[in-house]
Amino acid sequence: NAGVMQNPRHLVRRRGQEARLRCSPMKGHSHVYWYRQLPEEGLKFMVYLQKENIIDESGMPKERFSAEFPKEGPSILRIQQVVRGDSAAYFCASSPSTDNNSPLHFGNGTRLTVT
Amino acid sequence: GNSVTQMEGPVTLSEEAFLTINCTYTATGYPSLFWYVQYPGEGLQLLLKATKADDKGSNKGFEATYRKETTSFHLEKGSVQVSDSAVYFCALSDRGSGNTPLVFGKGTRLSVIA
């Protein structure tokens, strides 16, 4: 059973370009979470999605950031008009339910560098 | 709101030394507590968990006990190895009551030298 798959592993964008980060959850998992990790800091929650629905986006910046988890295909985190401060590692995690006994499974992350 | 505070690193230990990484939490409900480990260039992996007071989570020689009276979940290992060098994150989840999932501490970097 493949784990959470994120691609690309590394992404370089110039200021003003768009970044699209993809996440395929583990098989059977319908809950997807996106976290951002800045250098030497912990993970900050961004958004929680179930299939076709955004459940909690309290950690998402109000502008330029959006996320989706369509009925078919991976979850996408989209950052428009990137700025240098968007440089970070973005991690996706999935779980089969919201039960506290089902921990999150993380992907290896996408490291975004904005030049 | 919910929060996690863990000791700042980096922590540098010699092989076979005893490890403690402190973690305390603030939560409005009855959270589950977790320790995750991140090896260089990788995502986070679940190390151990405890879902209720006085539970002890253990894995790969690491242990942590859920202490409700002190709101703590300190990570311990009796004898560390070079391969334990990584960043360790304490986290809590109150997802059972619908709150924001997995709140993380800032992480503690551990370096074990031979």
Image (spheres, coloured by chain):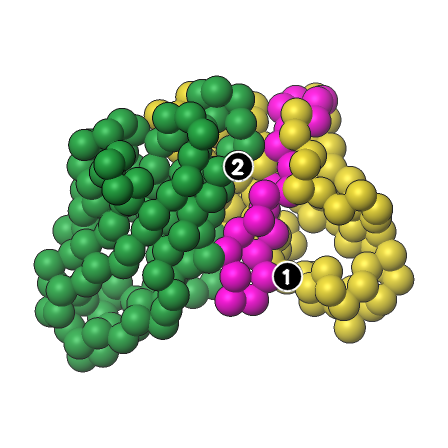
Chain colours: A yellow, B green
Whole-percent x and y of residue B83? 25, 65
**Residue type marked 2:** Gly
Task: Name the chief secondary structure element in magenta.
Answer: strand
A53 within the magenta span: yes
**Residue type marked 1:** Ala
Tell me if B18 is positioned left or right of A59 in this view. Answer: left
Q: Which residue is mark 2?
A: B1
Whole-percent x and y of residue A80? 84, 51
Tell me if B92 is positioned left or right of B52 in this view. Answer: right
Q: What chain letter is assigned to the residue under label 2?
A: B
Describe the element under mark 1 as helix, strand or loop: strand
B105 within the magenta span: no
Residue A105 in view in this figure: no
Within 10 Å of the Cα at label 2, are there few (<14), some (14-19), or many (20+) other Cα atoms?
few
Q: Residue sitting at 88 percent across and 62 percent down?
A: A16
Tell me if B63 is positioned left or right of A55 in this view. Answer: left
Q: What chain letter is assigned to the residue under label 1?
A: A
Q: Which residues are magenta?
A: A34-54
Residue A92 in view in this figure: yes
Describe the element under mark 2 as helix, strand or loop: loop
Q: Split into 4 quadrants, where in the image is the C terminus of chain B? A: bottom left
Q: Nearer the viewer, mark 2 or mark 1?
A: 2
